[in-house]
Image: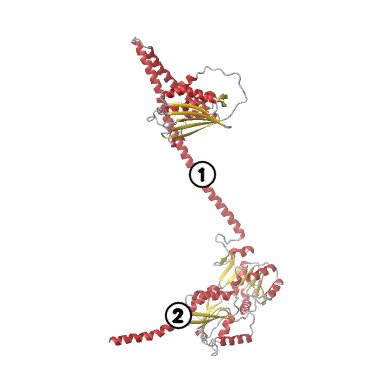
């Protein structure tokens, strides 16, 4: 049994192996015939489409032949050509014949039932046939394909739709069967056209003949329809479509239409065109289907491939074609994605509308931006007002404290003295002087507060003024520093003055500058710990005077530096600060320096100290006041007032 089973398996393999070998080597052969020559763009694109569609099927072999009927169409030439094909392909067994135009199809059709012909009862697939086709029942068993989908009457109607004013249409054709068919169909169906349309036929083989006929044609309301391929009379080669169109326009610059894909995108308006690549791909699909289904029995003997309206965007605007008359579904070439298919008059309106829309959008965006900016500004102003209100509230609370403290001291000292006097006790002069000292210091503090409040009011009302004259600012600053040394020593603070120059004459208000230096030194002493150090340094250049007051005290945080000269602002709040102050001293300092045309810079770091730098312009007055103003002003008393809260 095992031997029998093995024998059966071997027999099966033997039977199947030859079959498989035949299938693997079963190469399909197709003969493709083109009536013209290898330079014909229409035929080239059809062949390209066929190959693209059947490219994946490696068992199909295509051979191509060219009738070259553009050069010769007489019967003797065709008979000789048939004899050549029969001899050349005598031993080749083709499965299928593919024709891509009228002449090729007609030749193959005549030989379909000739037993001596290589075309005898071969499957024939055609395209590009323009004439009406009535196949016999016998022919239908072997022939199928696609008729030309482009109606020539439809093409004329397309021209008159785009150019209603046109009267004369010159149809440019060659001597091929394709062109003859166009002429015949137009003449046969002329009754379908407007009676006012005059069709002129310009026919020739060479470019020169065609150009001469165009020169002699009518110039009124004319359009050209080019349907042929023409040759150079010099070398016999086909004229490139773009070169021919350019030469025609040099003679007569009128709109040119076409029935051929060759002339699309070469300077023509467009036309009603069979797309050759589409035809080729449809042929490729049909070929594969015929092979897969074993014949053409399931195919219609004749079918049509739909044509497409095609227009060139650049050309329709060059010749002022009404774009609203372009048929729906038209393929538009050379049009960028952002360009609109509108008449020129509409385009101006559209551009104006587009421009107005852009302006409206910009206006809306501007208003929205402005609204958001104003909203942010209002929020900021509200926050500032809120902060300012809080500062005022804090200032009132602070000022109440500042006024109450010296008043309490004065009241307490006065009451103690009064009690001692009422008891008729002997009061020592030291005791009296001590109490009077407290009274005087507190009185100075009150005077300082009142002076600051008065000055703030003067700033607000514009009555604060500086009485400037030429002064040695080095002497002014140095004198103040010396008067303050004793106050610094009470906290064991080292106060140092240094200058690069002994004399710097500047146009200043001496009293106001003294007040600025005193205020800054007072702050430095208040916020510098014991055994600290304060340095006052002066220098100048050609343009500015620099006065620097530097301490190594408690410092100011970065977020508070920007507010340090703000009115009523205090670095520490009422409950946490360790030194007295109303919060308006530095505001007055900043105002005085600004009135002198200068500015104050500040640098500070927590627990490392603060540096104030006063920058004043170097300026002198040409007017010299010989009579020095007399005053009972005592610098020591001024220092006592400014230092009263230390």
Q: Is residue 339 left or right of residue 405?
A: right
Q: Is residue 411 above or below residue 293?
A: above
Q: Is residue 500 above or below residue 188?
A: above
x and y, in percent, of residue 128 in the image: 56, 77
Q: Earlier in the sequence, mark 2 or mark 1?
A: 2
CB under 8 Å between discs 2 and 1: no
Instruction: Quarter of the image for the N terminus: give it.
Output: bottom left
Looking at the image, which is closer to me, 145 or 114?
114
Give the residue pinned by disc 1.
370
Q: Which mark is residue 591?
A: none
x and y, in percent, of residue 93 in the image: 51, 86
Q: Is residue 166 above or below residue 286?
A: above
User: In the rendered image, which quarter is residue 33 located in?
Assistant: bottom right
Give the residue pinned by disc 2.
292
Looking at the image, which is closer to me, 448 or 250?
448
Q: How far apart are the alpha carbons under marks 2 and 1?
A: 72 Å
x and y, in percent, of residue 89 in the image: 54, 86
Scheme by which the image is coloured: secondary structure
Residue at image x 55%, y 59%? 338
User: What residue occupies the far bottom of the structure in this picture?
Assistant: 115
x and y, in percent, of residue 355 in the image: 57, 53
């Amino acid at each position: 049994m095992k031997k029998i089973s093995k024998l059966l398996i071997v027999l099966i393999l033997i039977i199947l192996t030859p079959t498989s070998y035949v299938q693997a080597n079963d190469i399909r052969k197709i003969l493709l015939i083109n009536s013209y020559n290898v330079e014909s763009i229409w035929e080239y694109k059809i062949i390209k489409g066929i190959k693209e569609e059947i490219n994946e099927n490696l068992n199909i072999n295509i051979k191509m032949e060219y009738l070259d009927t553009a050069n010769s169409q007489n019967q003797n030439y065709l008979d000789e050509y048939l004899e050549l094909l029969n001899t050349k392909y005598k031993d080749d067994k083709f499965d299928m014949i593919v024709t891509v135009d009228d002449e090729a199809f007609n030749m193959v059709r005549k030989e379909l039932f000739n037993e001596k012909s290589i075309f005898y009862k071969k499957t024939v697939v055609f395209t590009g046939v323009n004439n009406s086709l009535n196949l016999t029942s016998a022919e239908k068993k072997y022939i199928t394909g696609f008729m030309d989908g482009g109606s020539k009457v439809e093409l004329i109607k397309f021209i008159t739709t785009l150019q209603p004013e046109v009267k004369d249409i010159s149809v440019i054709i060659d001597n091929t069967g394709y062109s003859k068919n166009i002429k015949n169909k137009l003449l046969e169906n002329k009754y379908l056209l407007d009676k006012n349309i005059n069709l002129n036929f310009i026919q020739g083989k060479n470019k020169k003949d065609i150009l001469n006929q165009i020169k002699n044609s009518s110039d009124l309301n004319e359009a050209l329809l080019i349907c042929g391929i023409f040759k150079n009379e010099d070398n016999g080669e086909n004229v490139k479509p773009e070169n021919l169109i350019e030469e025609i326009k040099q003679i007569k610059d009128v709109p040119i239409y076409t029935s051929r894909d060759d002339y699309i995108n070469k300077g023509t308006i467009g036309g009603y065109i069979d797309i050759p690549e589409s035809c080729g791909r449809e042929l490729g699909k049909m070929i594969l289907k015929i092979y897969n289904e074993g014949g053409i029995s399931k195919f219609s003997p004749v079918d049509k491939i739909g044509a497409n309206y095609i227009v060139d965007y650049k050309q329709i605007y060059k010749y002022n074609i009404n774009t609203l008359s372009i048929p729906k579904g038209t393929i538009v070439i050379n049009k960028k994605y952002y360009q609109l298919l509108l008449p020129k008059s509409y385009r101006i309106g559209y551009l104006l509308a587009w421009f107005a829309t852009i302006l409206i959008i910009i206006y809306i965006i501007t208003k929205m931006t402005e609204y958001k900016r104003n909203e942010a500004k209002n929020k900021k102003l509200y926050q500032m007002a809120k902060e300012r209100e809080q500062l005022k509230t804090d200032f009132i609370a602070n000022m109440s404290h500042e006024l109450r403290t010296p008043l309490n001291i004065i009241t307490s000292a006065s009451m103690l003295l009064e009690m001692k006097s009422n008891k008729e006790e002997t009061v020592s002069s030291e005791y009296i002087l001590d109490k009077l000292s407290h009274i005087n210091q507190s009185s100075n503090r009150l005077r300082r507060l009142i002076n600051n409040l008065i000055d703030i009011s003067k700033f607000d009302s514009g009555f604060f003024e500086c009485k400037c004259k030429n002064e040695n600012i080095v002497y002014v600053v140095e004198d103040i520093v010396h008067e303050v040394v004793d106050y610094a020593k009470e906290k064991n603070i080292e106060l140092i003055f240094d200058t690069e120059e002994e004399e710097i004459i500047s146009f200043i208000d001496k009293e106001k500058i003294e007040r600025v230096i005193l205020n800054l030194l007072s702050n430095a002493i208040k916020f510098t710990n014991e055994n600290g150090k304060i340095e006052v340094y002066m220098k100048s250049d050609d343009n500015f005077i620099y006065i620097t007051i530097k301490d190594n005290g408690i410092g100011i945080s970065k977020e508070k530096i920007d507010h340090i000269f703000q009115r009523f602002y205090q670095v520490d709040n009422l409950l946490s600060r360790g030194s007295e102050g109303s919060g308006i001293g530095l505001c007055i300092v900043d105002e005085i320096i600004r009135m002198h045309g200068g500015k104050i810079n500040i640098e500070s770091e927590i627990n490392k100290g603060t540096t104030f730098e006063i920058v004043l312009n170097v300026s002198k007055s040409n007017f010299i006041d010989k009579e020095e103003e007399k005053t009972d002003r005592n610098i020591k008393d001024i220092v006592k007032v400014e230092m009263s809260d230390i």
